[in-house]
C-alpha cells in the first residue's frame, strides 16, 4: 500500500503535509496513514475522527499517525482512537527525528516555540499551484479562536529562505505560488529590521522574475501595510484576489470577537483595493451566529456583503471551542446559527454570480487544473471548451457564466 496522507483545514496544513510526506517516506513508513487535523471548528474535528475510524476499518493493520492543530491541543484524546499508533505535535511533525521515534505521543509545549524552520520541498503531488509557508503561529487572541494554542506564537521565515523555496518550485514547473501562514499580515515582526508582508511580496517578485503568478492567502484588513498596497496597485504578477479575515460586519460583535478592525475599516480597505486594482476580486471569512448576535447585528453582517462588494464568501456557523472566551458567552441556538449561515451563503452565491457574469467578454489568464477546469487570476473557477494539461497557464475569452463560475474558450 502507498502512503496515505489525509489533510484537513488550511493551506498551511497542505504545505506541511508535503513536508511530512518526505519525512515519512525517508522513515520507511510507506504503508502508514497520516491524518493532519484542523481545530478551527467542531465539524473539522468530527470529519477527521470519522476519517480515522474509516481508515482503521478499511486497513486495520496500517499504522495511523495523527498530527495537526487538533492533535496538538488534545493529544491524549486522539491517541485513544482505534488504530492510532502515534500522535505528533505541530512542531514535531516537521522534524525528521519524530518520524523515526517509537514514542506513542510526541507533543511539546507549542507556546514555547520561538523559531520556524524553512522546509524545502520539491512539489505538491498532483496539485497545480504550490504553497509556501512564510509564517507560523499567532500572537492575537480572538475570543472564538483556539488556533494560537495549536500553532504557538507568531514567527516568520526569513526572506532569503522563502525566495529559495520559491525558486525551487518554479524550477519544478509551477506557475503559481500561494504564500501561506496562520496570521499572514504579522509577517516579519520577529525578524531583523522587522520587514512587513508587502516588502516580502515585492522582493519575491523581483528575486524570481520567472514566476508568473504570486497569490496571498487570508489577510487581516486592518494590517495591510503601505508596501502591500503599492504591490496590489503595481505588481501585475500579484494576483488580483484578496481574501479578508473579516468574521463579522457589526462593530459590537467585532469587539466581542476581539478583532482588530471595525466595520468601516473593512469597507474602506475593500474600496481602496478596488480603486487600486479594478480587476480585483474580494473574498471574506464570515462567522454566523456569534454569541450575543441579535437580528440587527446579523443584518449588519449581511449588508456588509454589498457595502464592501464582496465576491466570494467562506461562511462558518459559530462553533464554540473549549477554552476560548467565546465558549463562555451566552450561546445562540444551533438552528439560529444554521439559518443565518444559510442566509450568508445565499447572499454570497448571488454576489459570486454577479461577479462571474460581469466577466463575460473579457480575456483572462487561466491556470489549468483538471482536464477542462482551472482558475482565473482573480480565483474565479473556469470551465474551458477543450481539455488542457494540468499546470498549463493559458489565455482564454469568457463566453458565459453560471453559479459554478466562468465558461471560457481557449485562445
Image (tube, rainbow, N blue to C red):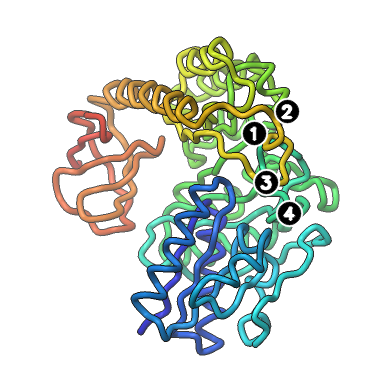
Residue 299: x and y in percent read 51, 12
Cα–Cα gap, marks 2 and 4: 20 Å
Q: Which dot, 2 or 4, sits closer to the camera?
A: 2
| Front one among 302 and 228 | 302
Cα–Cα gap, marks 2 and 1: 8 Å
Callout 3: helix, strand or loop? Answer: loop
**On the rendered structure, is 23 left or right of 222?**
left
Q: Which dot, 3 or 4, sits closer to the camera?
A: 3
Q: Quadrant of residue 167?
A: bottom right
Q: Earlier in the sequence, mark 2 or mark 3?
A: 2
> Dot 3 surroundings within 10 Å: few (below 14), some, or many (20 or more)?
few
Cα–Cα gap, marks 1 and 3: 24 Å
Asked if labels 4 and 2 touch by Cβ distance under 8 angstroms, the answer is no
Q: Earlier in the sequence, mark 2 or mark 1?
A: 1
Residue 172: x and y in percent read 44, 68
Callout 2: helix, strand or loop? Answer: loop
> Dot 1 surroundings within 10 Å: few (below 14), some, or many (20 or more)?
many
> Dot 4 surroundings within 10 Å: few (below 14), some, or many (20 or more)?
many
The residue wearing badge 4 is 156
Residue 101: x and y in percent read 66, 86
Q: Can residue 262 be seen by looking at this rendering?
A: yes
Amino acid at each position: 500500500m502507498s502512503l496515505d496522507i489525509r489533510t484537513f483545514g488550511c493551506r498551511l496544513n497542505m504545505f506541511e503535509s508535503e513536508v511530512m510526506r518526505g519525512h515519512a517516506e525517508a522513515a520507511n513508513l510507506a504503508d502508514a496513514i497520516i491524518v493532519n487535523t484542523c481545530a478551527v471548528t467542531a465539524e473539522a474535528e468530527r470529519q477527521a475522527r470519522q476519517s480515522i475510524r474509516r481508515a482503521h476499518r478499511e486497513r486495520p493493520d496500517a499504522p495511523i499517525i495523527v498530527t495537526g492543530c487538533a492533535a496538538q491541543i488534545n493529544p491524549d484524546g486522539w491517541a485513544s482512537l482505534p488504530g492510532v499508533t502515534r500522535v505528533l505535535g505541530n512542531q514535531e511533525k516537521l522534524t525528521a527525528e519524530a518520524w523515526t521515534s517509537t514514542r506513542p505521543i510526541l507533543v511539546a509545549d507549542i507556546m514555547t516555540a520561538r523559531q520556524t524552520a524553512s522546509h524545502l520541498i520539491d512539489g505538491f503531488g498532483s496539485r497545480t499551484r504550490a504553497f509556501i509557508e512564510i509564517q507560523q503561529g499567532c500572537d492575537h487572541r480572538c475570543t472564538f479562536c483556539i488556533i494560537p494554542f495549536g500553532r504557538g506564537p507568531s514567527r516568520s521565515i526569513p526572506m532569503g529562505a522563502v525566495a529559495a523555496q520559491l525558486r525551487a518550485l518554479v524550477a519544478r514547473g509551477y506557475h503559481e505560488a500561494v504564500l501561506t501562514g496562520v496570521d499572514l499580515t504579522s509577517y516579519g515582526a520577529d525578524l531583523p529590521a522587522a520587514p512587513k508582508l508587502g516588502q516580502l511580496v515585492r522582493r519575491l517578485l523581483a528575486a524570481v522574475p520567472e514566476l508568473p503568478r504570486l497569490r496571498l492567502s487570508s489577510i487581516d484588513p486592518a494590517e495591510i501595510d503601505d508596501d502591500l498596497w503599492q504591490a496590489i496597485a503595481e505588481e501585475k504578477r500579484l494576483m488580483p484576489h484578496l481574501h479578508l479575515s473579516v468574521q463579522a460586519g457589526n462593530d459590537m460583535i467585532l469587539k466581542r470577537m476581539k478583532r482588530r478592525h471595525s466595520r468601516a475599516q473593512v469597507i474602506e480597505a475593500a474600496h481602496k483595493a478596488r480603486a487600486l486594482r479594478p480587476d480585483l476580486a474580494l473574498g471574506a471569512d464570515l462567522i454566523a451566529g456569534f454569541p450575543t448576535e441579535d437580528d440587527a447585528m446579523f443584518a449588519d453582517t449581511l449588508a456588509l456583503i454589498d457595502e464592501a462588494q464582496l465576491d466570494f464568501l467562506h461562511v462558518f456557523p459559530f462553533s464554540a471551542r473549549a477554552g476560548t472566551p467565546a465558549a463562555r458567552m451566552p450561546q445562540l441556538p444551533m438552528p439560529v446559527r444554521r439559518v443565518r449561515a444559510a442566509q450568508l451563503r445565499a447572499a454570497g452565491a448571488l454576489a459570486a454570480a454577479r461577479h462571474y457574469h460581469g466577466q463575460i467578454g473579457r480575456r483572462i489568464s487561466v491556470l489549468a487544473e483538471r482536464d477542462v477546469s482551472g482558475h482565473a487570476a482573480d480565483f474565479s473557477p473556469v470551465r474551458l471548451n477543450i481539455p488542457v494539461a494540468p499546470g498549463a497557464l493559458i489565455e482564454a475569452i469568457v463566453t458565459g457564466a453560471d453559479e459554478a463560475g466562468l465558461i471560457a474558450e481557449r485562445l
